[in-house]
Image: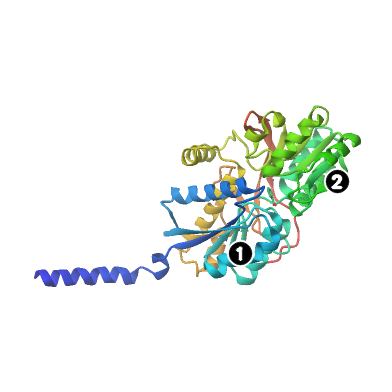
């Protein structure tokens, strides 16, 4: 074979490889993060992004055999901007999947756009029940929780601890309302009741008047839904008002997750319930924590776990279609059957694409939400109304 002939043959072979590789496999898969990067939920958005990217890095930077390209929009936890913001990712950036968000009000607007445009949406936090209830759709998945789940578990535990008369306090929006609804259901089932429901607008942190009202009501306990910067302020103000000495404070784990360094002494001993805890007896959690600590020089929290699991869930879908997102039915079918090997413990999805998972009781010790016990095993949100 002459040198020229050999070179031509090699060229032909290379061209054949290029034509055989499907076009989608040569392009990057576009992931659009719509998360809060400013405001009271900033730390939550960052942890979700970190967790997601950690999983992708562990897969060699690829999902379904394709490299990943990221796009980002700061949703500011602002429902009125949600439609414009998600459209930036869908129409301007042409993403294959949207990953978002934290705030329940924002996610409801996102879900409507995702449904109307048939965009794949993976929710890494926001627990709005409507999204996996009446608004459910084949292209919408949640890798986190429903607002009802941790609330229900805490209500059950509070009732079992003999709390008969409880006051609730929360921001007035879907997450707070539904968290309180879950708490009430659990508390009533174990013999107690809510005697007063206090609220303030999101993301207001002027708690003084409401704390005075709590002191005057003298309940057996208080249940509070706050998260991020607002949770830090609430727990500190509760202790500073002297209430933690006389009226036990309970909450879904968001009250103390990712916040303990800032809350310091004011959070010590608090009991909360959540689908994650420090010191879980879960093998996957040990490797996850080591990898997260080494990548980001800090310990992970529940939001980081949810970001990691959002990537895992998406990877299961993309792997099933070898990265070909046009095979939507196969991709969705694989995600629906997913068994996620999560740091929180293995979980599956309900028919409405909602995690069915264990809820843990945790106790604050130092800067940890220490695992105490399983409060409710395999808890599914009973939320009715999903017709797919
Ligand atoms: C929500 O809006 O759904 C939410 C925000 C922060 C923590 C938990 C839930």
Q: Position of residue 110 (x, y in %)?
A: 65, 63
Q: Residue at image x 80%, y 48%?
A: 200
Sequence-earlier tag: 2 or 1: 1
Q: Nearer the viewer, residue 12 or 230?
A: 230
Label 2 residue SS: strand
Q: Which quadrant does the C terminus fall into?
A: bottom right
Q: Which residue is mark 2?
A: 197
Above or below, 126 against 219 in this view is below
Mark 2–mark 1 Cα distance, whole angstroms, equals 33 Å
Q: Nearer the viewer, residue 214 or 314?
A: 214
Percent coordinates x, y for residue 331 in the rendering: 53, 63
Quarter occupied by the N terminus: bottom left
- Colouring scheme, one of rainbow, by chain, secondary structure, one colour: rainbow
Label 1 sits on a secondary structure element that is helix
Residue 243, placed above or below residue 57: above
- Whether 333 is drawn above or below 245: the answer is below
Q: Which residue is mark 1?
A: 86
**Viewer-nearest residue: 236 or 149:** 236
Quick one: label 2, few (<14), some, or many (20+) residues within 10 Å? some
């Amino acid at each position: 074979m002459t040198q020229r002939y050999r070179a031509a043959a090699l060229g032909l072979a290379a061209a054949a490889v290029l034509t055989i590789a499907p076009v989608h496999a040569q392009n990057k898969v576009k992931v659009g993060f719509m998360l809060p990067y400013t405001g009271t939920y900033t730390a939550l958005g960052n942890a979700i992004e970190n967790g997601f990217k950690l999983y992708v890095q562990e897969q060699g930077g690829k999902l379904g055999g394709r490299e990943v390209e990221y796009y980002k929009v700061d949703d500011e936890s602002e429902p009125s901007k949600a439609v414009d913001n998600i459209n930036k990712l869908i129409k301007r950036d042409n993403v294959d999947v949207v990953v978002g968000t934290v705030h329940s009000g924002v996610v409801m607007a996102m879900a409507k756009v995702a449904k109307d445009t048939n965009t794949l949406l993976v929710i890494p936090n926001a627990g709005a029940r409507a999204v996996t209830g009446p608004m459910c759709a084949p292209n919408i998945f949640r890798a986190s929780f429903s607002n009802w789940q941790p609330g229900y578990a805490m209500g059950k535990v509070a009732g079992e601890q003999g709390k008969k008369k409880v006051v609730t306090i929360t921001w007035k929006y879907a997450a707070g309302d539904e968290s309180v609804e879950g708490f009430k259901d659990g508390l009533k089932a174990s013999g107690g009741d809510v005697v007063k429901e206090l609220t303030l607008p999101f993301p207001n942190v002027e708690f003084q008047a409401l704390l005075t009202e709590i002191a005057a009501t003298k309940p057996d306990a208080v249940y509070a839904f706050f998260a991020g910067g607002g949770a830090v302020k609430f727990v500190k103000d509760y202790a500073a008002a002297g209430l933690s000495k006389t009226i036990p404070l309970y909450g879904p784990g968001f009250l103390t997750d990712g916040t303990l360094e800032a809350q310091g002494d004011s959070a010590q001993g608090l009991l909360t319930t959540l689908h994650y805890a420090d010191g879980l007896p879960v093998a996957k959690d040990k490797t996850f924590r080591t990898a997260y600590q080494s990548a980001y020089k800090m310990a992970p929290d529940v939001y980081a776990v949810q970001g990691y699991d959002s990537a895992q869930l998406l990877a299961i879908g993309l792997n099933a279609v070898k990265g070909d997102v046009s095979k939507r039915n196969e991709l969705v079918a694989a995600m629906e059957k997913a068994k996620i090997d999560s740091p929180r413990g293995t979980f599956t999805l309900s028919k409405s694409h909602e995690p069915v998972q264990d809820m843990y009781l945790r106790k604050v010790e130092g800067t940890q939400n220490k695992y105490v016990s399983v409060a409710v095993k395999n808890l599914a949100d009973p939320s009715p109304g999903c017709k797919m």
